[in-house]
Image (cartoon, rainbow, N blue to C red):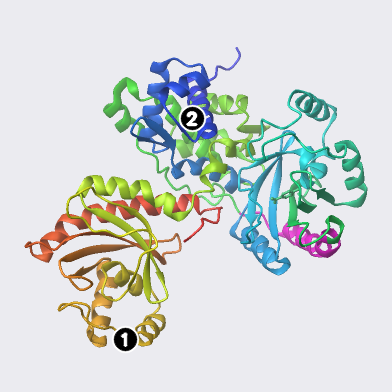
Amino acid sequence: MPEESVRPLERGLAVLRALAAADRARAGDLVRATGLARSTVDRVVATLARLGYVRESGQELQLTPRLMELGNAYLAASGLTGEVAARTARLADELDESVSLAVPDGDGVRFVTQAARRRAMSVAFRIGDLLPAERCAPGALFAAEWDEAGWAAWHARVAADPDGHAFPALPPGPAPRVPDLADRTAHSRAAGWALDDQLIEPGLIATAVPVRDATGRTRYALSAVSHTSRHTAQGLAELVLPRLREEAAQLEALPTAPSPYEEGELTPDQAPDAADAKAELGPGFLRSLARGLAVLRALGRARGGGLPLTAIAEATGLPRATARRCLHTLELEGYAAHDGRLYRPLPRILELGYPRLSRLGFAEIAEPHLRELTGRVHQSASVTVLDGADILYVARAATVRVMSVYITLGTRFPAYPTAMGRVLLAGLPKPDRIRLLKAEPPTALTRHTVTDPAELHRVLDRAAADGYATADEELEEGLRSVAVPLKGADGRVVAALNVAQHAGTAPLGETIDALLPALRETAAAIETDLHTAARFNAVRMP
Ligand code: PHB
């Protein structure tokens, strides 16, 4: 009997693809894009929202950074360790050019690592972006391994879509005239490297070399990317090839990371308990969609060859038959494959929102959470970072009130008399904190400002110990603020979150009790998104 696919999983994936393509959409747009009934779309969306993958803001639906955990499953399984990322970043520094790793995905090339240079004119591709093979350097390397069916699929696609409309990462407009892919592929095979001389757009050039797996197949293309204002295409190749080749050899020699499965460290899945969600949403919760996505996440534990069904059933807590049907559906959709008894995730998973979500900067990740916090406490909320001895506002959600705290993005205040400044200073190594406070000795801005260095250090030590700080009319008469730190995955304080309000007549302790739980929950939600987004991707910090 042929295996049956899991319908709610198929539908959920279709909705995720439609949302990924649209950025923001209303339920009606999703009905049109997927051809599903409105009631089905509503149940899929309710389920995805419960799983934290979709956010409803007003009538509009949007994907959340949390969805990147699906793409992260593929990236983790593909062996992109911190060591690989660190190596490409170092190479980019050394060459002073952007460096990327890409993998073959059908007749396309999918980026899995980007170490970009910050230049006015810099490469805009991000992790998850897909390019057609004929329009980039890695394509000629990957096409060298296509069989007849691979070439036939490519010919059919180019005939159907010569300008590459199916590739949102390409610049809009007609394709430039590009050299024949078969010729470029033959040349690359003989030379052992490939060139992109403005195949994507005028000015953009790249050189790529293959990084092979133990069987000799091309696993990644390692590229250096530049611009004709800096080099000619040939000039770039001469300059970077020796180092690219050396680096490719190093990457080939890296040991594959052990599988968390083989290591026996099966961390439990973090997803909300399907039974709870079912009880809460009743028929509005599609349990088999939740289960299918849990299976997809579980594939992130695969290393090398993949995971056996038993391991996937164990990781998800699903019966083997259920897990197998989910895997079968994921295979039909192009997100998983199996060799013998081992299952592994495929790069196409990255099409589920990763390119757009990996472009979000830190402020954009924080903003929806700030709006939620403001809605909850009816006071303005902000995020700042430390810039020298100042705090700098990078994200904010304001309330509409007659009397509210008026601050815009880009505003600066000295750190020492503010709650956010205090959690930021408290997060610094002691010598840095001492140096900053010495460089600009505190002055009294109100009657209440703490200016005595010894007392200020005590205030900061307490902030570090308590995990929050306050400032009560120390920056400005009448203004009170409570702040908590935002930490990166390494535990370092990267920003501060606060709620500010009129000091009023309530004792400070009451304000702390009223605000701290909401501040801490919001900080945890921002950190979860930040850590998911930053696992394989350099999130733009302000
Ligand atoms: C890139 O990393 O952005 C890149 C790589 C190879 C190309 C073009 C762009 O051919």
The numbered disc on residue 14 is none
Magenta-colored span: 236-257
Image height of 423 relative to 528, above or below: below
Alpha carbons under labels 2 and 1: distance apart: 58 Å
Quick check: 513 left or right of 484? left
Name which of mark 2 and mark 1 comes first in the sequence.
Answer: 2
Q: Is residue 18 magenta?
A: no
Residue under label 1, please give it. 441
Across and down, in percent, residue 159 comes to: 79, 24
Relative vertical location of residue 258 with respect to residue 83 in this rendering, above or below = above
Residue 242 visible in this rendered orientation of the protein = yes
Q: Residue furthest front?
A: 402
State the residue at coordinates (54%, 19%): 5
For marks 2 and 1, give the one nearer the viewer. 1
Residue highlighted by disc 2: 292
Residue 265, position as x, y percentages in the image: 49, 51
| Amino acid identity at mark 2 | Gly
